[in-house]
Image (cartoon, grey):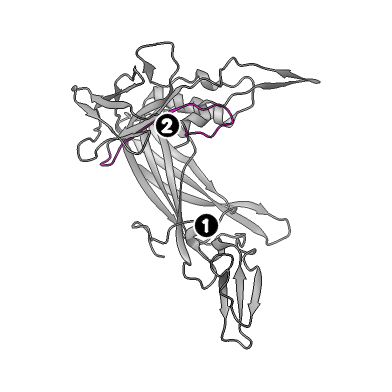
Amino acid sequence: MIRLSAIILMFYILSLAEGCTIEFDPEIRTDEELLVVEGMITDQNSVNRIKLSLSTRIGKPVGTNKVTGAVVTITDENGIVTTLRESPAGTYVTDSTVFRGRTGGRYALNVKVNGKSYETGFVEMLPVPPINSLYYEKVVITAARDSNDIDEGARIYVDSYDPSGKCLFFRWDYVETWEYQIPYNVVNKICWVTERSDEILVKNTSLYSQAKVSKFPVLFVSNKSDRLKETYSILVRQYSVSEEEYNFWEKIRNVSQNVGNLYDVTPMSIQGNIRCCDDPEETVLGYFSVSAVTEKRLFIHDTFLGLPVFVTYCATDTLQGVLPDTGLNSDYWVIEDFSDEIPPFWVITTFKECADCSTRGTKVRPPFWEEF
């Protein structure tokens, strides 16, 4: 999930006019520390996390002002209170053996910290339909005229449908995993790299005759990385959200895509569903989400034209005769061993990532991984 504290605090100070530059003061105090609440509870048998932090000044690292020592609780419509445990600092978690959200349940968040109390109203966990289909289509990125040079990528789509019509507002996120291979005979040759999405993907179907999503574009995988080189996988999670939460994410998405336009929605005007009980005028950032979840995984093992060779820089030198011990596997690494040749020689690299795939990912094969 994209960091809310990074997006919400973006603002614009310049507006260009014809022939001159006009300074614009949005009257936002960038030195003010505001409470930021990020978190979600779901119907999955897993840990739920609520993150608390203080907003940072513009230009400062995000997420460094963690709020510790808070008392964080979740109350359901039956009055059952669940107290979250802080682990690690600034993150408050539920016990998956004790607490699990349920469809149709209503939940409220309460945070007590620094002598103040913050709360949300009750939020209902709406049902979510399964993902009907997750698929990709090849896309030609560039094709030179009168040439066979073609670059291809993959555009990933999702289809969904709720025949009950209860889930009108959808949100998605995803986790990418791809196999990464070093094209040399090294010990750590094959690894897997995982990255989480930082995009805001929402859809409103309330204006249509049915709660149906057709060919919604989740992600475009270009040839600018090595994702499509071997085998690529994406896990897409689908959430049911209320109209209020949909509007929140839509505003955040508009701001993140249109930063710099004087007439865009200012970030400080994007209010979430958290309020300060002691001071109704205090601004609290973030959103407490309550959602049912369904997910689907897609594998792509295909041939794509125009994928560049990403390791052309690796072979940096050749050593002959006797391989010195000094600097081996610290300053340089062997990627090609021709010690049986006469005279013996070795191709070396000064880039560790060219000899050890674990610098980028993990050597442990994911349990869900499929062989092709």
Residue 253 lies, with reference to residue 294, above or below; the image says above
Q: Residues within 10 Å of mark 2 (few under 14, many from 20)?
A: some
Quarter of the figure with the N terminus: top left
**Residue 9 at what x, y percent from top left?**
53, 25
**Which one is earlier in the sequence, the residue at label 1 or at label 2?**
2
User: Mark 1 belongs to which amino acid?
Assistant: Leu
Q: Nearer the viewer, residue 13 or 58?
A: 58
Residue 324: name its quadrant: bottom right
The answer to whether residue 111 is visible is: yes
Identified at 43% across, 20% down, the residue is 284
Question: CA gap, disc 1 to disc 2?
Answer: 37 Å
User: Mark 2 belongs to which amino acid?
Assistant: Lys
Name the residue that disc number 1 marks: 228
Residue 191: name its quadrant: bottom left
Name the residue that disc number 2 marks: 66
Q: Main secondary structure of the magenta part?
A: loop
Q: Secondary structure at mark 2?
A: loop
**Residue 109 at what x, y percent from top left?**
31, 24
The answer to whether residue 206 is visible is: no
Q: Nearer the viewer, residue 172 or 334?
A: 334
Q: Are marks 1 and 2 in contact (CB under 8 Å)?
A: no
Q: Which residue range is magenta in the image? A: 44-64
Residue 144 lies, with reference to residue 121, above or below; the image says below
Q: How many marks?
A: 2
Identified at 43% across, 40% down, the residue is 173
Quarter of the figure with the C terminus: bottom left
